[in-house]
Image (cartoon, grey):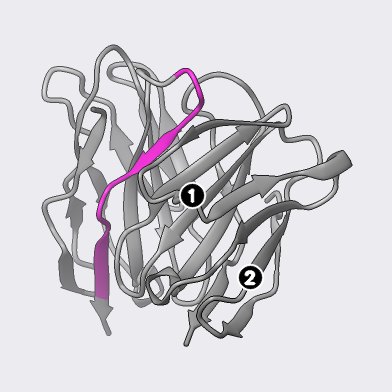
Amino acid sequence: GDSVTQTEGQVALSEEDFLTIHCNYSASGYPALFWYVQYPGEGPQFLFRASRDKEKGSSRGFEATYDKGTTSFHLRKASVQESDSAVYYCALGAPSSNTNKVVFGTGTRLQVLP
Amino acid sequence: GPKVLQIPSHQIIDMGQMVTLNCDPVSNHLYFYWYKQILGQQMEFLVNFYNGKVMEKSKLFKDQFSVERPDGSYFTLKIQPTALEDSAVYFCASSPGRRSGNTLYFGEGSRLIVV
């Protein structure tokens, strides 16, 4: 079935470091791809999405480019801040589902040290 | 951004009792969802709902679970009877349209503790 894989369970960086969180997907066709961020005690917040090959999504300095060739949607930020510490989820709008189902990856916990 | 409200934020309940979790979705949204998150773990899809009907449910959506949205009021998740393994945070989400992969907007979650 449709799925999302996030290889990093946890990432620890210092402020102003470059961030990459890897996301690969498995699905037929062109699923919509999303990044969500979850702060402690809160629900996931939508960051951005992309729906077509080579489309770039971005928000708050984060960005990711839809790559159908490598089935990836890696999250990047040039210079992280302590306030970026949170759990980041890659998600997929399942194209095999005609019910609008959205599947989440396992999440990556980002800790940014001052 | 759009707000989804969930009531209650926390509930402690005895095993075997019934619990109803309430969700007030974004006003013009058409699709509604419940996700389950055990502490420190991933978001797991339970069910989605459209036009008064369950569209899809996962294996986690046991027979003891039910959802409804009577007369456009709260979208509810009812668990009857509850079990210890139902302890988790339950997140409600809504999305505006029909196309696969529409953006979900989440509430703050309802933390359920079954003792």
Q: Amino acid at mark 2?
A: Met
Along the viewing direction, whichever of B65 and B104 lies nearer the viewer: B65
Side of A64 where B30 appears, left or right: right
Of mark 1 and mark 2, the one earlier in the sequence is 2
Q: Report the residue at 55% width, 85% height from top.
A: B14
Along the viewing direction, whichever of A56 and B10 lies nearer the viewer: B10
User: Where does the magenta region start and end?
Assistant: A98-111
The residue at which mark 2 appears reads as: B18
User: Residue reaching furthest top?
Assistant: A29
Indicate the quadrant where residue A28 lies: top left
Q: Please, is residue B20 above or below residue A15 in the view?
A: above
Q: Report the residue at 64% width, 25% height from top.
A: B97
**Rendered location of residue B63, percent (x, y):** 49, 49
**Rendered location of residue A51, percent (x, y):** 40, 21
Indicate the quadrant where residue A30 lies: top left
Q: Give yes or no for residue B98 being in the magenta stretch.
A: no
Q: Please, is residue B101 above or below residue A7 in the view?
A: above
Side of A41 where B10 appears, left or right: right
Indicate the quadrant where residue A11 lies: bottom left
User: Residue reaching furthest right?
Assistant: B71
The residue at which mark 1 appears reads as: B63
Side of A66 where A99 appears, left or right: right
Subunit under mark 2: B
Q: Amino acid at mark 1?
A: Asp
Crowdedness near tag 2: few (<14), some (14–19) or many (≥20) residues, C-alpha within 10 Å: some
Q: Report the residue at 17% width, 72% height from top.
A: A13
Q: Report the residue at 45% width, 40% height from top.
A: A48
**Rendered location of residue B78, percent (x, y):** 63, 59
SS for callout 1: loop
